[in-house]
Each structure stands twice: as C-alpha cells, then as structure tokens.
Image (cartoon, helix red, strand yellow):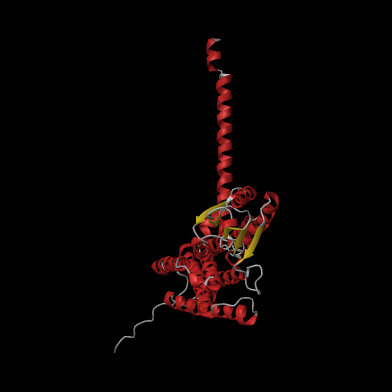
C-alpha cells in the first residue's frame, strides 16, 4: 500500500505541472502573436500607407496646435509688464500718486513705473520704445501720452483703463496719442501681415526648390534663395505701399528687411532639411509659425502676451522682422541693431548647418566626368 501511494502522482505536483504547462502555452501564444504583429508592422511600414498614416496624425495634431497657439496668444490679451515713464513733479504729486495707485489696481499691478526728471527724457524713451506711455501732472489732473505706433493694443488698454481710473479717483485725465498709426493701417496689423507673408513664403520657396529643382547643388540653391528673397521682398513692399496704400514704407529699408526675412526663413528650412529629411516642414512650421508668429508682437504687443512668448519672440526671425519693420516705419531715427543681429544670427547658424551637412541635401547633380586625353 505504501508503494502504491508513492507511485501515485501527488495532486499538488500535478496541479503545478498543469499551471506550468498553461503558462508555457500562453507564453508561446503571446510570442507567436507578437511575431505576427511584428511581421505585419514591418510589412505595413514598407507600404505607402505608413507615411500617409503618419501625415494624418501630424496634420491632426498640427491643426490643434495651430489653433491653440494663436488662441492662447491673441484671444485674451492681458497686461503683464507695461513699462511706463513717470515725469516726477516738483510739487503737487498727490493727483499723480492717486492715479498711479488706481492704474496699478486696474491693471493687476502690471504697470512698471519708471521715474524721469523731465518730459523730454521721458519722451525720448518713448521714441526708443523702452516705455509705452508717459505720465505727467497737468494742473490738477494727469496727462497720459501713449503711442499707438509702439503697440496699438497696449495704447488701447492703457487709454481705457486711464478713463475708468480717472472717473473713480476723481483725477481729471487727458489721454493723448502722440505717435498714431498711419491712416491706411488703423489697427496696426499691416506690419504683422507683411512679415507673416515674408516668413511663410520664404520657407515655401525653399520647399519648392527642393521638390521641383532638386538638381540644384547647395551653392546654387542658396543663390536662387537670395534671388527669390530679393524679388519677393520687393513685390511685397510695392503692393502694400504703392498698390494698396496701406503703409508708407521707407522703401529701401523695408525691402531689405522683407528680403532678409524671406532668406532667413528659407535657410531655416534648408537647415532642418539636412537634419530631418522629408519631415523638415514639421520643425520649420513649429518654429516659424506655431511659435514665432504668435510671439512676434505684431498682432498683440509683447507687454500683453504671456510672459514666455513675450520673451522668446524677440529672439526668433518673425519677431525680429516685425520689430525691425515696425521701427523702420514709425521710429526711423531710433532703429536698433538687435533685430538685425537676430536675423543675421539665424542666417549664419542655418547656413553653417546646411553647408556642413550638405551631402545629406536631397538632389544635386553628380560631378561631371573628366574627359580622358588620347
């Protein structure tokens, strides 16, 4: 009897063997299914449906990002950091102090008062676009000078807030626009539109050279980019100034800024083209359109943009283009080197990367064979 019990399989051992067999079978099934899925995925990646599916996903995400970035920047402009010159009076500062306290409350402490000893120095700072308004005591009240040319949205916000604060505080307020916009551009958007056109057409031109003139060598490609930038910038300036009369442009300087913007935008795409190949449009669109244009300060001035956009935008080509063009049109005697340095910097970086990895540039012509001598 003892031997019979010893030869019988232990129920617990038999149960463990059954579990192990089930686990091995399940693992084999999973491994087989994984191999089938991997094989199917490999076959799918070799079909034209794979890049088409990727494009569908990218376009869907891009549509949301495009709408979100512009809505985030433009839908509800809110004052965040508005530098304002305050002419310190010799006496009778009580109305000015009450008005400043009311403005601070109305604008959620976003006003940044900067004291100046005289109106002349404060006005010079306004012309330099270091401040967006000048406050000074006038009799028993306060005068606020704004400059729509420095930022139409900022001037509007300050003017509306000043009127309300003046009524609540009992301080008579006079708002004067000392630097108005041109009659053909009452909302100050024309500069943004022409810079936007130069930016987008700039990299679209580079894309078309890649697709339809792929036999161009890298040096020839750069030469043709210079050509379409010069001609395109000239066309934009002529149509906006002479054709539509929307802006009176300082023609040589505006033409140069537009051409430089188009060339920079084309070089940025060319840089991404050697780095990312056929997907180069994605980083180009993200940098120049999704991030660069909303943060450029053209549609909504930088003091009303979210702080990150207001800071980053000045270092990107669209923001530099708007800044240079805006100053050239409205503050001709106070042009700054910074926006030009930004454009030149992007040009140099993009050109160096493009030229360093030019062997990865799609297209080009094979070197001609050297004829042998008899």
- Residue 163: percent from left, percent from top: 68, 56
Q: Residue at x 56, y 10 (%)?
A: 1
Q: Residue furthest bottom?
A: 374
Q: Quadrant of the C terminus?
A: bottom left
Side (left or right) of 336 relative to 93: left
- Which one is in front, 122 or 117? 117
Q: Is residue 156 visible?
A: no
Side (left or right) of 42 relative to 77: left
Q: Is residue 195 visible?
A: yes
- Which one is in front, 247 or 280? 247
- Residue 347: percent from left, percent from top: 45, 69
- Which one is in front, 251 or 209? 251
- Residue 176: percent from left, percent from top: 63, 64
Q: Residue furthest left?
A: 374
3 over 159 or under it: above or below = above
Q: Residue 22 appears in which quarter of the rendering?
A: top right
């Amino acid at each position: 009897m003892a031997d019979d019990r010893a030869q019988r399989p232990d129920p617990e051992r038999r149960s463990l063997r059954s579990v192990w067999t089930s686990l091995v079978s399940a693992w084999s099934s999973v491994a087989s299914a994984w191999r089938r899925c991997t094989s199917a995925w490999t076959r799918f990646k070799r079909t034209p449906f794979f890049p088409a599916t990727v494009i569908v996903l990218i376009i869907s995400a891009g549509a949301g990002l495009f709408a979100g970035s512009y809505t985030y920047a433009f839908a509800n402009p809110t004052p965040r950091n508005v530098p304002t010159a305050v002419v310190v009076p010799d006496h009778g500062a009580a109305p000015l102090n009450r008005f400043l306290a009311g403005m601070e409350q109305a604008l959620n402490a976003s006003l940044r008062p900067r004291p100046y000893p005289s109106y002349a120095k404060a006005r010079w700072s306004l012309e330099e676009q270091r401040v967006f308004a000048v406050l000074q005591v006038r009799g028993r009240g306060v005068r606020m000078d704004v400059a729509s040319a420095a930022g139409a949205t900022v001037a509007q916000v300050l003017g509306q807030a000043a009127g309300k604060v003046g009524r609540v505080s009992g301080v008579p307020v006079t708002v004067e626009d000392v630097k108005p916009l041109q009659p053909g551009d009452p909302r100050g958007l024309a500069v943004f539109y022409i810079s936007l056109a130069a930016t987008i057409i700039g990299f679209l031109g580079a894309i078309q050279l890649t697709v339809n003139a792929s036999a161009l060598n890298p040096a020839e490609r750069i030469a043709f980019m210079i050509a379409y930038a010069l001609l395109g910038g000239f066309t934009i300036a002529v149509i906006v100034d002479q054709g539509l009369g929307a802006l009176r442009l300082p023609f040589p300087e505006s033409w140069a800024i537009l051409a430089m913007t188009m060339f920079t935008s084309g070089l940025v795409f060319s840089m991404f083209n050697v780095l990312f190949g056929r997907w180069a449009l994605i980083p180009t669109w993200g940098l120049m359109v999704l991030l660069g244009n909303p943060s450029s300060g053209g549609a909504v001035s930088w003091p009303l943009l979210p702080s990150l956009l207001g800071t980053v935008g000045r270092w990107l080509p669209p923001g530099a283009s708007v800044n240079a063009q805006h100053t050239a049109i409205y503050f001709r005697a106070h042009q700054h080197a910074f926006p030009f340095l930004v454009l030149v910097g992007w040009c140099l970086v993009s050109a160096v990367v493009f030229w360093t990895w030019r062997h990865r540039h799609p297209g080009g012509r094979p070197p001609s064979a050297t004829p042998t001598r008899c």
